[in-house]
Image: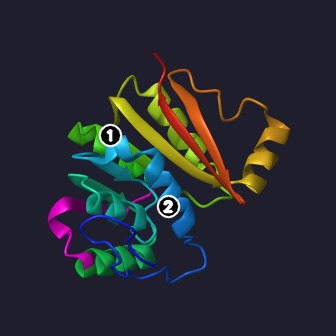
Amino acid sequence: MRIIAGKYKSKKIEGPKTKSTRPTLDRVKEALFSIIRDYINEAYVLDLFAGTGNLSIESISRGAKFAWLNDKEKTSISTILTNISLTKSNEYVKITNKDYIKCLKNIDNENILFDIIFLDPPYDSNYGLNTLKIISDSRQKYLKKDGIIVYETDKNFVNKILKKDQNAFDQFENLICFDERTYGGVILKLYKWRE
């Protein structure tokens, strides 16, 4: 794994230590950061299911001001700490080892709003949809007024969910999916506040 662009460009970082962590592929990451480039500079970033820290470190490399990395798996936290050390980016980050709902409560208590929220949960879980609902119902907490949420999932999960509920990914009262991209089996859905 490597950082693609910015001040840590070409820096190699450690990959996942377990099969349950699935890092964003370089070609998907490159496409993603091309889409969100206007949001990155000086951004506050939340990486709720951080895995290896790949997306947060790429964000910092490209000019983000701060990243909050969270993961409930201790092996993931170990990898994140290694990668933060490799890139010497510790002054830009906060790392928590919590369940995503506990992390959101923690963020709520600290009154932080983010420019970019990355949701890259285990593909075969409802964690991403649950998080979108929590944010939507929060009445403008977590996400800045002009911020975005990037939800990474896969085709199989999306198809399975859509068979049960055609509106599953568009049911949020205060959030709207304004862009969707497919890269092989990976789907990126981008959300923002409804106007």
Q: Work out whether mark 2 precedes mark 1 in sequence or the reverse, and give the earlier one.
A: 2
For residue 80, say whether it is visible: yes
Whether the magenta-drawn stretch holds residue 107 is answered as no
Q: Give the class, few, some or many, for how many residues have Cα within 10 Å of label 2's Cα (few <14, many ≥20).
A: some
Residue 47 position in % (x across, y down): 39, 55
Going by the numbered disc 2, the residue's amino acid type is: Lys
Q: Residue at x 19, y 75 (%)?
A: 88
* Residue span colored magenta: 87-99
- What SS does tag 1 mark? strand
Of marks 2 and 1, the one in the foreground:
2
User: x, y (%) of residue 71?
Assistant: 42, 64
Against 51, residue 108 (above or below) is above
Q: Is residue 3 above or below residue 13?
A: above
Is residue 91 found inside the magenta-colored segment of the image?
Answer: yes
Query: Which quarter of the image is occupied by the C terminus?
Result: top left
For residue 29, which numbered disc appears in the image?
2
Front residue of this view, candidates 46 and 29: 29
Mark seen at residue 115: 1
Q: Nearer the viewer, residue 33 or 60?
A: 33
| Secondary structure beneath label 2 | helix
- Which circle marks residue 146 in the picture? none
Q: Is residue 13 above or below residue 96?
A: below
Report the amino acid beneath label 1: Asp
* Residue 101 seen in this snapshot: no
Q: Residue 188, position in %: x, y?
A: 59, 48
Mark 2 and mark 1: Cα distance apart in space = 18 Å
Residue for point 23% across, 61% down: 93
Residue drawn where x is 41% and y is 77% of the image: 2
